[in-house]
Image (cartoon, rainbow, N blue to C red):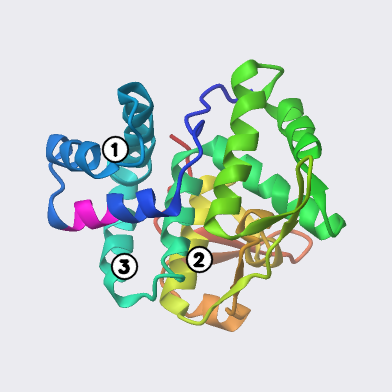
Amino acid sequence: MPERIGFDRKLKRAWLDQAVEVLLSDREPEAVRAALRQGLSGDITVDESRRKVITLLTGIWLRMPDELTHLRDEALSLWPELEPQARLVLHWGMALVRYPFFRDTVAQVGRLRRLQDTFTTAQLRHDIVARWGERAIVRLSAPRILLSLEEWGVVELVKAKGVYRASPPNALTQNALGFWLLEIALRSTSASALPLYDLLHLPELFPFDLQISPGDLHQSPRFIFLREGNNVELVALANGWTERE
């Protein structure tokens, strides 16, 4: 059973944007933390709360295994070219690959979205507790992620007492961005390869409409293609690294 939760705060989109803007000017860890302490001081006045938020922000964008730095750097290079709304993809992808608890939580939101028009905080919490264990941190963190998703605009509260609906997905019209997100998604799973259809329809990517065809994917040097015995086409990473941290 996975142990590390990590993503246990509600994060505002503006804080994530600020973390990226800081990194674009300076990647020295203490300088990044100092800039975030100053930048978040107006929103978060309690030192300990601010420290925990900064730890999460730097976990998404600064502190990571060497195997992921090229994807983080690619995201930073894409950032100036994107409209503000499209930049959410970059935050989403980095959170997926850095925090398995975040990935499992948003994947469950995606599954609930496919099954029904609305879902409740209680439904989400029940499913996540079943996977991650009956722990206080699990019961607290899943709703905090849901509050983050609401603030980011990918789900909306439709009734009192925690009844939510997923917002319409945003179209990703740039193949480069879609390929980046699919590589991130494949790296965040425990599988070394996924069936082509499954990769293009992962529930954790529910906020985005990936306008990528199988033919587009075949032309990308990021991926290689394999065949199972039953002739199912599998997609793997060209460099072969899919292990979670």
Q: Viewed as shown, does residue 183 lie left or right of 53?
A: right
Q: Residue 54, how many percent across, how many down?
A: 32, 35
Q: Between 172 and 244, which is closer to the camera in this rendering? A: 172
Q: Tell me the quarter of the image containing the N terminus.
A: top right
**Amino acid bearing label 2:** Ile
Which tag, 2 or 3, sits closer to the chain's start?
A: 3
Question: Which region shows up in magenta?
Answer: 20-24
Observer-side mark, 2 or 3, equals 3
Secondary structure, mark 3, is: helix
* Residue that mark 1 sits on: 63
Residue 139 in which image quadrant: top right
The residue singled out by tag 2 in the image is 224
Image check: 224 left or right of 132?
Answer: left
Provide the residue designation for mark 3.
79
Q: Is residue 107 left or right of residue 47?
A: right
Residue 90 spot, x, y in % from top left = 42, 60
Report crowding for label 3: few under 14, some 14 to 19, many 20 or more residues within 10 A (C-alpha).
many
Q: Is residue 137 above or below residue 68?
A: above
| Distance from Cα at disc 1 to Cα at disc 2 | 28 Å
Quadrant where the image shows the C terminus = top left
Residue drawn at the location 86% of the way across and 56% of the way down: 115
Return the disc, 1 or 3, that comes first in the chain's sequence.
1
Badge 1 amino acid = Arg
Judge from the rendering whether residue 29 lies leftward or rightward of residue 238; answer left or right.
left
